[in-house]
Image: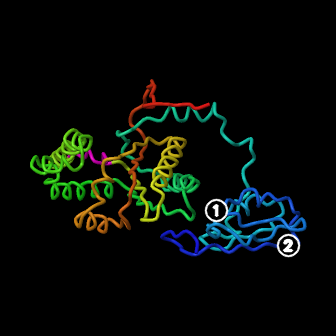
Amino acid sequence: MAIPTSRTKEPAQIKIIADKCNGCGLCVSVCKDFAYKLENNKVTLSATPIFGCVGCGHCMAICPTQAIEIHGRELSPQDLFALPDSGKAATYEQLLPLLQFRRSIREFQDRPVEDDLVAKILDAATTAPMGLPPSDVNVLVLANPGKVRAFAQDFCEYLGSIKWLVSDWFMALMRPFWGRENDELFRGFIKPAINVFTGYMREGINVVNYDAPLAMYFYGSPYTDPADPIVAATYDMVAAESLGLGTCMLGSIHPFIQSGIKARKFRESHGIKYASREGLFVIFGHPEVKYHKGINRTFASVVIQD
């Protein structure tokens, strides 16, 4: 039995075309399931794979003679494509300015994000690495300002129904159980956030997702590596920057819609298939403002062991 995901629980099937194999052994070196071995200068299947083929496709992609085909786990030989010429790859000197130009944009022009740009953003995000194929990342796309605002209004109504979570009596009751850091987080961020979101929405001001022209929510399934939605969202954001769009990560929506019956009903009403350990909203639009300076940031710590 292969490692399960929400999309498949069976191993992929490996097909070796022996008369095409030149015995180079590249597939043996890249398969970390140890599914292959060399015998008489030909690759053959090992009797002792670790999990069964997960469908990463490394062996199929590296084989110079097309001697290996993988079928299953949402993968087939038809999914192979020729890599672009290496000269087209961005250099560090090209990539760093792109990342430096990106800032969190919450002010957008009153114009839609074109459908072809949405498709390009999503295409780029599908190239993100994942903990285990096939990807268990799901994406909710709110494709116009009306959908974006309707989501924010529903979210604020939902927040209003769970405000007891940040009542003084409940936080005092829970402090011995969830500890100082969570208590500080609830008092310093979560309670004010709920009050700000709902209070401003009552005045017709949307500070949940800023009435952006486009929003995407990346989330996983119960099987997903927690990092996968975050990595995919990051790829999405960088791709949008390269297309001239402004972006902003919104981390405050996801945690509120994970636990409880009301959260489940909210998710279902918006077509969100699963509660997810990690998830991230990203908003997009043609920026209304232009920054002329960047800001240096630092990590909390960097420990180099050499």
Quarter where residue 210 is shown: top left
* Residue pointed to by mark 1: 56
Residue 146 x/y as whole percent: 31, 56
Q: Secondary structure at mark 2?
A: helix
Residue 277 lies in the magenta-colored region: no
Q: Which residues are magenta?
A: 205-211
Q: Secondary structure at mark 1?
A: loop
Instruction: Reply above or below: 43 against 199.
Output: below
Residue 78 got which mark?
Answer: none
- Identify the amino acid type marked 2: Ala
Q: Residues within 10 Å of mark 2 (few under 14, many from 20)?
A: few
- Identify the amino acid type marked 1: Cys
Pick the quarter of the image with the C terminus: top right
Residue 183 x/y as whole percent: 21, 43
Judged left or right of residue 234, residue 10 is: right
Residue 18 got which mark?
Answer: 2
